[in-house]
Image (spheres, coloured by chain):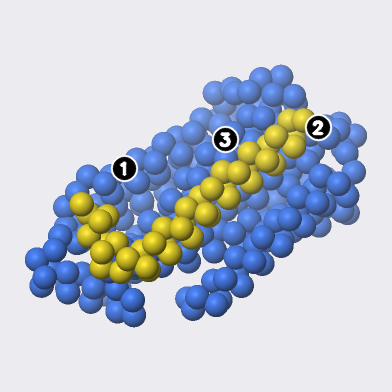
Amino acid sequence: MKQRKVTILGWAAVVTLAATAFFGIVVTPPDVVQRQYVRFLYLHPPMAWVAYLAFGIAAAASILYLWPKTRRMAFDALALACVESGVLFTGLVVVTGSMWAHPVWGTYWVWDARLTATALMFVLFLGYLALRRVGGSPEQVAKRSAIAALVSFIDVPIVHFSVLWWNTLHQGPSVLTPGLSSQGVHGAMAWTMLLSFVAFTLLFAWMVARRMELERLRLGGTNRSLEEQLAARRAEGVPA
Amino acid sequence: MTDVISAYVLTAVILGTYATSLVVRSRRARRDGEGGTREHHA
């Protein structure tokens, strides 16, 4: 992606995130039941959505890398960028979820299906990042990481459907179901929630673009593809 | 309300720190060129 487009994406994320914070804290009304704590609605669910999106793209990129006909190092870089952001967002989902749970549930943490599966997802993808540092040739690292990403991704649908499959303290899905308003989110709250989803998705896209650019620069190239850079480095006798 | 504001601030600080690190590392890598690559592997 061109540098100018990435910059525009970054500023769009900043503006929409600032608008989300303003609408979420100042404009939207408190809830009848949850009072001020309903404002977590504009923070916690959009970050969970971004984590799903990040790990979904990472899994798709990993499949494309493992498939011989579509094997490109760029897909490995995309998976890495997505997982890195995804782990960050998952960590924040756990922390903000606990901060929300304490006043609403009366506890920071319970080992129910949704929370446990989310914690497992965080650890699995953290393991993916650790696995990348084990060493080996770039191809070995990419192949090993792609398999790890696909194995880890098995937990993602379990996280999402856990509230439907088991009895949990965590509420059921309020967004990824048909008809947002039918789930009890209305008016300014619904629009602010949608804005928050757009804002965090823009931020995620900017992070991935920046992280992929960093990976390209880390390999020492400017305009060459990752494959060309790796070939050049091997020819120089420099470990890639 | 303090819990809510704390969560917003915490999120902003953590995401802001990661975003800043991406910008700084990219600029450094771009400036250093090949030197940045070798430094990373040193």
The answer to which quarter of the image holds residue A35 is top right
Q: Amino acid at mark 1?
A: Ala
In the rendering, at what x and y percent does residue A40 appear? 73, 40
Residue at the image position 27 percent from the left and 55 percent from the top: B40
Of residues A16 and A150, which is closer to you in this image? A16
Residue at the image position 65 percent from the left and 50 percent from the top: A46
Q: CA distance from mark 1 to mark 3?
A: 20 Å
Residue at the image position 59 percent from the left and 34 percent from the top: A95
In the rendering, at what x and y percent does residue A176 appear? 66, 52
Chain letter of disc 3 in the image: A
Q: How many marks?
A: 3
Query: Mark 2 or mark 3, which is nearer to you?
Result: 2
Q: Is residue B10 visible?
A: yes
Q: Which residue is mark 1?
A: A130
In the rendering, at what x and y percent does residue A110 appear? 59, 22
Q: Which residue is mark 3?
A: A94
In the rendering, at what x and y percent does residue A177 appear? 69, 52
Of residues A147 and A172, which is closer to you in this image? A147
Chain letter for blue, please: A
Chain letter of disc 2 in the image: B
The answer to which quarter of the image holds residue A124 is top left
Task: Give the colour chain B carries in the figure.
Answer: yellow
The kind of secondary structure element at disc 2 is loop
Q: Which residue is mark 2?
A: B1
